Amino acid sequence: MKIIIFKSFFVLLLILFGTKISSLTNDEVRTEIQSWIDTQTFPQDIDANTVLIGIQVSTRGIVYNYKLKLPGDEISNFLQVFDNIKMGAINGLCELPALNWYKENQVEMIYTYMDENNNLVTTFKIHSSKC
């Protein structure tokens, strides 16, 4: 009876902590992200007002650097615009199968936006813990 209880407890521990054991290390995450970054070319036009000017790795994440094609003062509804962008990024991370690797490996995603004069407009961070 004690053996069955022990085996059941061991299986439960494997289920609960199995994903943590199989997660990549910070170095492995950085290497995988850098390999993907190396396949990209910059700048990339995202929309009429936004250009992706570069991507970098962080400790356990990826940093997207955007430049806007207008001065920061010309952004109407500033807070709402960037709140919508952040919520869209979180929804994408949580729902898009293409981003499962980021969720499974607990990758931090950081977004920075500069205006056309290279002034910092905003920065935000998302993580699978928000899903």
Image: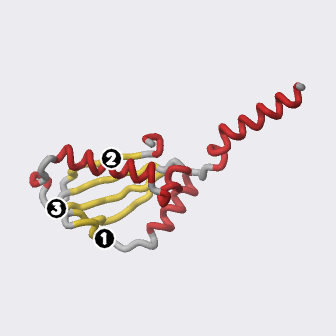
The answer to whether mark 1 and mark 2 are in CB contact below 8 A is: no
- Per the rendering, the mark at residue 116 is 3
Instruction: Give the mark nearest the N terminus, 1 or 3.
Output: 1
Residue 93 coordinates in the image, percent (x, y): 43, 51
Residue 97 coordinates in the image, percent (x, y): 49, 57
The answer to whether mark 1 and mark 3 are in CB contact below 8 A is: no
Which one is closest to the eye, mark 3 or mark 2? 2
CA distance separating discs 1 and 2: 22 Å
For mark 3, give the secondary structure: loop
Amino acid on which the number 3 mark rests in the picture: Glu
| Vertical arrangement, residue 19 with respect to residue 70, above or below | above
Which one is closest to the eye, mark 1 or mark 3? 1
Q: Is residue 84 left or right of residue 91?
A: left
- Per the rendering, the mark at residue 87 is 2
Residue 91 coordinates in the image, percent (x, y): 39, 49
Q: Quadrant of the N terminus?
A: top right
| Vertical arrangement, residue 125 with respect to residue 48, above or below | above
Instruction: Give the mark nearest the N terminus, 1 or 2.
Output: 1
Which residue is located at x 30 percent, y 71 percent?
43
For mark 2, give the secondary structure: helix
- Per the rendering, the mark at residue 44 is 1
For mark 1, give the secondary structure: strand
- Per the rendering, the mark at residue 61 is none
Q: Tell me the crowding category of disc 1: few under 14, some 14 to 19, or many 20 or more residues within 10 angstroms, Cα based.
A: few
